[in-house]
Image (cartoon, rainbow, N blue to C red):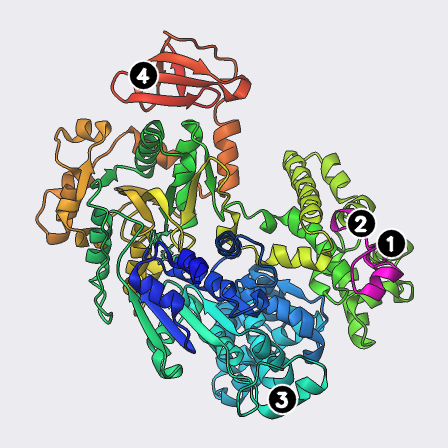
Amino acid sequence: GHAASDRLTAGLNPQQREAVEYRGQALLIVAGAGSGKTRVLTHRIASLIDGREAWPSQILAITFTNKAAAEMRERVEALLGEAAGGMWISTFHSACVRILRREAEAIGLSSTFTIYDSADQRTILKRIIKELDADTLGFTPASAQAKISKLKNELSDVETYARNVNTNDPNDVMFLEIFRQYTRRLRDASALDFDDLISETVYLFRAFPKVAALYQRRFRHILVDEYQDTNHAQYALIRELTRPVEPEVVAELDAHGVLVRGLTDATGSIPGASLTVVGDSDQSIYAFRGADIRNIVEFERDFPGAKVVLLEQNYRSTQNILSAANAVISNNFDRKDKKLWTADGDGDKITGYTGYSAHDEAQFVADEIEALHRAGVAYRDIAVFYRTNAQTRALEEIFVRSALPYRVVGGTKFYERAEIKDAMAYLIAVANPLDELAIRRILNTPKRGIGPATETAIASFAEQNDLSFRQAMRAADGLGLGPKVTKAILELATLLDAAAAMLVPSQKGIDEGTNEGASKVSEVLAFLMEGSKLVETLRASRDPQDETRAENVEELVAQTKDFDRENPGAGLVDFLTQVSLVAAADELDDASGTVSLMTLHTAKGLEYHAVFLTGLEEGLLPHQMSASEPGGPAEERRLFYVGITRARKRLYLSLAMSRAQFGEVSVAMPSRYLQEIPDELVDWKQSPGMANSRGGSQPRALNARRGFGGGGGGGGAWGTRDRDLERFSVTKSAAPKTEWANRVTGTVRDNGDLTLEAGDRIRHTDFGEGTVRQVTGEGTKRIAHVAFDAAGQKKLLIKIAPIEKL
Ligand code: ATP
Ligand code: MG
């Protein structure tokens, strides 16, 4: 009776079905975007569990984001019709943290180790570089960080580096010293950086075959999505996990009561896990982080006898979109030619638009989104992509003005705000008393009179007496500091100790190995905020920004409450881990009815009804940093390909002829990749402003594109000067996004008391004169629906729109 498995393969094409049903050791699924790779992985997991070939606990699936992991879990459970607890579906990083927290002791780490983010890394490197005077040799925190990261992704540690160091090269010798100190400081603080999470797990498995065997035995089926973006360390991890367990180790496991019966083969060993990887080398976009396409190309060599399945049919996009994607990517050499096709028809043409400024481009995007929305497309099914975060400014300004609901994915960086890092540092200092970075961060935050000299005194006392910084704080009495400072240090130490005591479970909890009786994360945070007066101090401050900062910290308290509710039994370390591992795409919230704005890198694996690819200009795509790098333009082309293939029905390509970058307005050239899309696929649009300034009705981008071939004619378009440009130069400061948004919504203009009603005539700075048709909303959210004489229908947030009543 295969009724169940029929259900699991129904709706799959023959190649997809073959991939779901294949039962050999190694399976490679290579296919273009939208061909159902992720779907096949999901069905494969469900099929293994459904056919009783594997317990959920024997499955390890690796996804690109935590959100993708959650989705895959839900879909597997939906297919099975029941919960399938015990499956590990997670990112590489999450899986490794889980393993490392369990096995920390083996490698001399505390199980409550801290995970350092990029900013933490730079803080430490900055100190080291200063102490070593390494800046005189040209070292910066960022350059040292990049080099260390690269080495770790190649599994090269300090000792390996030391063996190969060129002792005649002062730079090399200095770098070795930086690397060594950096490694020592993380060790001393019981902290790991992001790259360590993977490499330390590999070292753990290599150094402790019995520990490795526990996981090799456990995971019988390993599945990896987005395999083209794995780096060497991740590849090595997969190799370790898929090794067979030798008979001697099996015997030892058996002796320790680990269940091995039924898992061994005739030779007495446990065979290696079966491995399924899916990927698309055309979508490899993380080479700059060490991702190595060779992992996919050489799969058949590394896993002999591997089965390869090719998927060709695309189920996501229209043929016009696919034809554009095919045309673009075929310009990359060194690839197997594969063409995406769909049975669903051509669909609409692609829409192209050349704005005369970033604002004009943004206005086009906003107008089209409104049109799509009116036609019934939900805001959440629309996405706007760009190459660099700085590009959001113009988009946000226009979106705010048009009262368009949007969300910048990965742009809010809530956890990177100083006040949130401060509050988090209190929690980290409690969870990991060895974490000097966290303690030093809060030593004088809020101000309690502990200056840099005192900080140094504590640090050197700790060093001389072989104590941790925290232990040295407890001994502040003997440091010969003034009574006020001494008292402040002791009070902070006591506060942290008291919070740590809240985390200890009751005797029952300890006996049963649970968190029972321990305070919740939200309670510990509230206790710390109260005791440290962090929020209170922010509230009392005269700096108006501090009020917002206080609110942010309270938002964090609210988040811990959510965490406590959603994760009963989880503790502080779980919360800290979750925060450390949140990736940009994890912030996506399908339920919210907003347009998503994100970088092309974040867009991987996602799909939307309508997609806007903006800023398609030389210097942005390809990005100026990669344009001259070997392999750079090819990787940027893959990024463009990833962007195009996210669209299901509607694709928009746009650019601006002038753009402010680094505070300068400069003339932009269309991206070289635009040329690669056949003309007949794209319908170039006109903007009213352009038609006026140029007095013609040539499709503007085509005109602009003549610039490539030297055919002339593009100059007029590029030379355009207009009001929008002038306004642009006034606002050319490179202010961070939040300040920018504040300025737009708060400071620049406030029409709060302007009363408008249907029939009123108004004048808008950009759109000219128009008639108010309707006013909706209340208070600061009042929106005027205006029919402009030349610019058509617009919705304006009255409070901030640049309008006057006539
Ligand atoms: P990407 O390379 O972008 O990650 P992918 O190859 O993983 O894409 P999926 O996301 O699995 O592709 O599938 C793309 C879309 O096509 C999804 O909406 C999926 O549900 C749908 N799809 C895949 N296979 C089929 C099928 N056989 N029948 C109907 N829809 C399908
Ligand atoms: Mg996918």
Label 1 to label 2, Cα distance in Å? 10 Å
In what quadrant does ligand 1 lie? bottom left
Measured along the vertical axis of the image, is residue 310 above or below residue 731?
below
Question: Do the residues under discs 2 and 3 have CB atoms within 8 angstroms?
Answer: no
Residue 130 is situated, as x and y percent measured from the top left of the image, at: 61, 68
Precedes in sequence: disc 1 or disc 2: 2
Look at label 1 and name its amino acid.
Glu
Give the magenta-colored segment's residue range: 499-523
User: Which quarter of the rendered picture does the C terminus lie within?
Assistant: top left
**Toward the viewer: 708 or 663?**
708
Structural crowding at the residue carrying mark 4, measured as other residues with C-alpha within 10 Å and reported as few (<14), some (14–19) or many (≥20) = many
Query: Which residue is label 4 attached to?
Result: 787
Instruction: Check mark 4 vs ligand 1: CB closer than 8 Å? yes or no.
Output: no
Label at residue 491: 1
Precedes in sequence: disc 4 or disc 1: 1
Residue 631 is situated, as x and y percent measured from the top left of the image, at: 30, 68
Classify residue 62 as left or right of residue 324. right
Label 4 to label 1, Cα distance in Å? 64 Å
Label 2 to label 4, Cα distance in Å? 58 Å
Front label number (1 vs 2): 1
Residue 396 is situated, as x and y percent measured from the top left of the image, at: 43, 36
Question: Do the residues under discs 1 and 2 have CB atoms within 8 angstroms?
Answer: yes
Query: Which residue is label 2 attached to?
Result: 448
Query: Which residue is label 3 attached to?
Result: 249
Label 2 to label 3, Cα distance in Å? 56 Å
Classify residue 53 as left or right of residue 360. right
Q: Is residue 515 magenta?
A: yes
Structural crowding at the residue carrying mark 1, measured as other residues with C-alpha within 10 Å and reported as few (<14), some (14–19) or many (≥20) = some
Instruction: Check mark 2 vs ligand 2: CB closer than 8 Å? yes or no.
Output: no
